[in-house]
Image: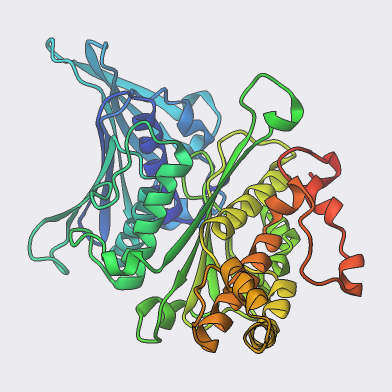
Amino acid sequence: MGSIRTIPDLCRRLISFAFRRCRASDDLCRVSVALAGSPVVRISVSDTGAASCLEEFQDLRVTDEVIFAEKWDGTLSVRTTGASDEEVHYYNLNLKEGSSNSWLTRLPSIAKNGVRFSGTEVCLSISEKFEVLLGEIKQFIEKMLILNIPNIAFELVVQHENVYKSCYGDAFLPSKSMPSPFSASNVERLKYGFEDYILKRCNNLSNDLGLSLNAMEHLRTGMGTICSSKFSGRQNPGLTVDAVIIISEFSDETNPCSRECGGQTEVLYFKDFSPSLISKSSLNALKGIDWKSYGLTLGNIMDQGGSASLEWENLPPHAHVDVNFPPSKQKVLSERSLLKKAAKLALDDVKEKHSRILLSDRALKIQSHAPDLARTLAGLILSSNDMEFQGECLSLLGLQTGVGAEVVEECVMDKINAVIELNDRKPERCKEAVPFLFEDDILQGMDFEDECEEGEDSFDSLDM
């Protein structure tokens, strides 16, 4: 675990622990976060998942001593119980003590009197700006919902006299508009959760309004999953990296997503099923992707204190790209390579599902000549005096004799564009050689063999 630099960072870590305990349970679970009071804010993070083993708190390392000196005394009050336990166990943890034996104090337990339940509550009191803390926690929970775990719900309860006249609560539930069955894979649930997150952000939808079906039509989503065991030949699961890429295409500048994001892309990075700081190796993986083969020109990658933002030089008007990487908890040297491969699989998935999306620079260049070529071919067909030849040409195009020049021209151009798109899809190119529509000197300089070797069926240790 990384070090804790701020109070919101500590709260995010405690929420992640609660979420992890819920994932370890087979039952329906709830994670609740309660904030009350000011200027001293009392924070409670509770869950109905498996009991805490307490060892997770030993990973908490506060590096900024100002937190201890001015905002928090380092004490966590913990109560926890398992479903089979007969008591609720109480502890005080003092993180100031670090790894010494005095960091944990066991308090008297309370009998459950035969009632069967499980869960954990962690409480602490800190001095922090209430509004800042509330905003950070709410934003973190919204990102956690992207994982779309169907048996876990979130609850945020707030009581603050200076801001709110009474106590209020927000319930964060998996989207009902995007059903995600328990049997769905992690990447499938991630797809639904990410689409939900994007639409709520772009359309300013509140949690209880659901999704705009019209806005849903503008999303182009691709998924990619890769596992290190596929290359190492080992029997253990290894490191699994999932990637989801969403391209939003809106028709006008009035859309909130177009106004707010423009040509920038926020990269969401998850580790051990929790929003995490993006690593330098992951940033290098993003730089190493051949974006031009998907018609995109990457400008800058901005490291914003652990989060990343991509700037594009040629993103089409009213278009927006979102990227999400949620790898598993295991860390190996191949993470950079696997992330890069998973992203490319997701990009290829978008190309396969949606025509005229993510075409390479070369394909777009060829397509720019398609109208003139279609017009020429249509003219040759219709100007021919050989009616048999003309009829056979129209028949091959799926047209009847007597159609107008515009219909023939449009049909020819559609056929040309279809060939260009088919030839531009990398999976097709790697499986078998597809005849190119045009041959030029640029083609000879393109190293298609290296691109195929970076696909699913090979692994280069030098790419780690």
Viewer-side residue, 162 vs 444: 444
Judge from the rendering whether residue 303 lies leftward or rightward of residue 53; answer left or right.
right
* Residue 24 in which image quadrant: top left
Above or below: residue 20 compared with residue 25: below
Specify whether 319 is left or right of 144: right
Relative height, residue 243 to residue 102 (above, below):
below
Q: Residue at x 63, y 48 (%)?
A: 342
Which quadrant holds the C terminus? top right
Number of numbered labels in the structure image? 0
- Name, please, the residue furthest toward the left: 166
Report whether residue 128 is seen.
no
Quadrant of the rendering where the N terminus is positioned: top right
Q: Look at the picture and state if 131 lies above or below 462.
A: below
Q: How far across and down, in percent of the image, does residue 339 sit? A: 65, 48
Q: How is the image coloured?
A: rainbow
The x, y position of residue 460, in whole percent, is 83, 41
Residue 145 sits above or below residue 163 on the image: above
> Do we see residue 201 in this rendering?
yes
Residue in view at x 77 percent, y 48 percent: 432
Q: Residue at x 73, y 77 (%)?
A: 366
Residue 288 lies, in percent from the top left, at 75, 59
Percent coordinates x, y for residue 224 in the rendering = 57, 47
